[in-house]
Amino acid sequence: MSKLKEYQNPEVLRKLYWEEGLSLNKIAKKFSRNSTLILHYMKRFNIKRNPPHGRKLNVDKETLENLYWRKKLSLGKIAKIFSVNAGTILYNMKKFNISRENRKPIQLPKINFTKEMLEDLYWKKRLNMNEIAKNFGLSSTLVLKYMKRFGVPRRPSNEEKIIIPKALLEHLYLDKRFSSLRIGYTLGFDHRFIRKRLEKFNIPMRSLSEALTKYSKTSFSGDLKEKAYMLGLRAGDVHSKRQHKIIRVQSTTTHPAFLEMMKDVFDKYSNVGIYKFFNKGFNSWQWFVYSDLNHTFNFLLEKPQEIPDWILDDEDLFFSFLGAYVDAEGSWVVLKSHEKFVRFVFKISSMDKRILEQSKHKLNELGFRTHLYLRAKAGTSNKQGTKYSKDFYSLMMYRKSDVIRLAQILLPLSCHKEKIAKMNLVLNNSTKKWVEVKDEILELRKGIKESRLNQSISDN
């Protein structure tokens, strides 16, 4: 025979209910059961309960009069003092003939409701009575009382089936990208009601980060050449981070050509924002450029530490990656040679040793002659006083035919106008002498220098 549980023991129940004065709810809570089960066992064991008007209290008339009349406590507050219900207090007050007639009735909060106010809250803003009551610290019963007083009709129970078609909401919210606030204003409803309808129809809600931006975001095309180019930028000067569900790509520069490059690459997917700021680290003004992209650009979150195999294994994808990396880190140099002639130098300088090694190996495979040099050790500083956190390397190409061939390959892949201008300079002047190209070279250098942000500011 199984052992009886405590709440099934009549002696335990009598002691808790009559000696300790616990209510059915408190006894039920003590045993983690519901009050209906406790009542079942009390009836089963013929344990008498308090009369409907409450149990007797071990309290005198003077104490009750003091609490009720002098301290002005309500029946509920007095009942709380003695751990009983308000009916018990009322029963004992009647027993002692303690009058309640001259006490002021409980004052409900004074709300200057008007018919127009309730119609606006209930019909236009589509709040239910519980929501209205909560806003004013009242009970829904009191709100219903005022609605009846002013003759404000209730909404029909089948209203949800006939208000705002799903197709209309999808068109406004998904196609036109209206906010719930704007849809509500357009259709004459409160935005909270609109959001309820969106949830009702299982229309996917925009995330907080998507909702807070006024610019739409297009998913990545999936084109591998474009992906390789973007990864080349990410390996260079373009940084990326997650903000909620948004992927922000960003960089700083003093070159307007870099800003145009960022627009060419990312503007078709999202807005490209630009603003000027003072960089204390460099003691100069710079541009901050950024674009907030959707989750399909997750591949840009991590900076590549090496060129992925799927890029290295495909010549076209490799040059797409290299073109972007050159746009970020590379340079094309046109120099005077032997008093009369022109020589070309191609250079990529960075601390990404592994990427430079892979690029050198791949270019050598394709017939280019390249050289990799250690330019500065970690911990040393450049002429501007910037300290290198890692070893600094340069990948160089000196053979004129190689530089020309590489320029021919990368020219259609580049998005950086300064780099494009220099590649055109290389290709258009490969057979000329220095005296024939000197003015063009100096003019290009001057134009690039004057276009830089610091130069333009110093001139003002």
Image: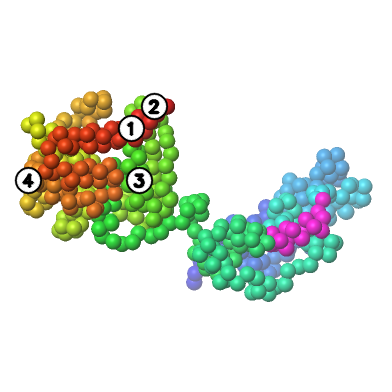
Residue on which disc 3 sits: 260
| Inter-mark Cα distance, 1 to 4 | 34 Å
The secondary element bearing badge 1 is classed as helix
Mark closer to the observer (1, 4) = 1
N-term mark: 2 or 3? 3
| Inter-mark Cα distance, 2 to 3 | 22 Å
N-term mark: 4 or 3? 3
N-term mark: 2 or 4? 4
Q: Residue at x 28, y 32 (%)?
A: 446
Residue on which disc 1 sits: 450
Please tell me how crowded label 3 is: few (under 14), some (14-19), or many (20+) other residues with Cα within 10 Å. some
The secondary element bearing badge 4 is classed as loop
Residue on which disc 2 sits: 459
Please tell me how crowded label 2 is: few (under 14), some (14-19), or many (20+) other residues with Cα within 10 Å. few
Residue on which disc 4 sits: 369
Q: Residue 66 at x, y = what percent?
A: 84, 41
| Inter-mark Cα distance, 4 to 3 | 32 Å
N-term mark: 1 or 4? 4
